[in-house]
Amino acid sequence: MYCGLADIRATVPENDLVQLTDDAMPPVAVNQVNVDRAITDAGELIDGYLRGRYTLPLSPVPGLINTLAADVAIYRLYARRIKLTPPEGVTERYKNAQKLLEQIQSGKISLGAENTGGGVTPETGGPQFTAPDRVFSRDTLGDY
């Protein structure tokens, strides 16, 4: 896990956290099982982006990854409530987390952790294509 309940509590007010996690009517307390599920989902998403570039799981957890995991987990908690639209700030933080993860994956941002050397880097480049020489060109078709 790249974040914990304390990281989520630092952002989400306690009353909102109870409403998002407790399925009892009326909600009484934070349901740790639902929080852990959101945190696990966030970790799996992050690992999906970082797999092949870094040795997983990251240990120690870089501060940026901790923040991104909390943002994704909070979004996942709101997503549990189908009829509840996440606040704009929560959605923005989730989208920003995805963009940052894409930049980490592509190597534009480094975590400062040990890099496994996998993935596409500027030195290895992307896919390369080769083809045979052209049969018809401007010169060979010039008389037509």
Image (cartoon, helix red, strand yellow):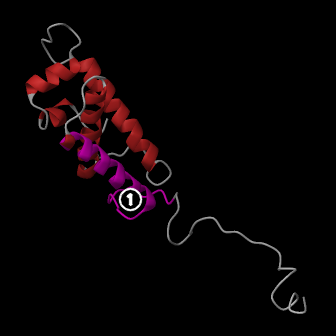
Q: Is residue 16 above or below residue 59?
A: above
Q: How many marks?
A: 1
Residue at position x 17%, y 7% in the image: 25
| Residue 55 visible here | no
Q: Residues within 10 Å of mark 1 (few under 14, many from 20)?
A: some
Q: Residue at x 36, y 37 (%)?
A: 43
Is residue 110 covered in magenta? yes
Counting from the top left corner in percent of width and height, residue 119 is at 52, 58
Based on the displayed image, in which of its 4 quarters is residue 40 positioned? top left
Give the quadrant of residue 126. bottom right
Q: Is residue 40 above or below residue 125?
A: above
Kind of residue at badge 1: Gln
Please state which of residues 12 and 111 is positioned toward the viewer in this rendering: 12
Residue that mark 1 sits on: 103
Whether residue 11 is visible: yes
Classified by dominant secondary structure, the portion drawn in magenta counts as helix
Secondary structure, mark 1, is helix
The residue nearer to you, when weighing 25 against 31, is 25
Q: Position of residue 17 (x, y in %)?
A: 15, 25
Residue 86 within the magenta-colored segment of the rendering: no
Q: Nearer the viewer, residue 57 or 81?
A: 81
Residue 2 in percent (x, y) is at: 29, 39
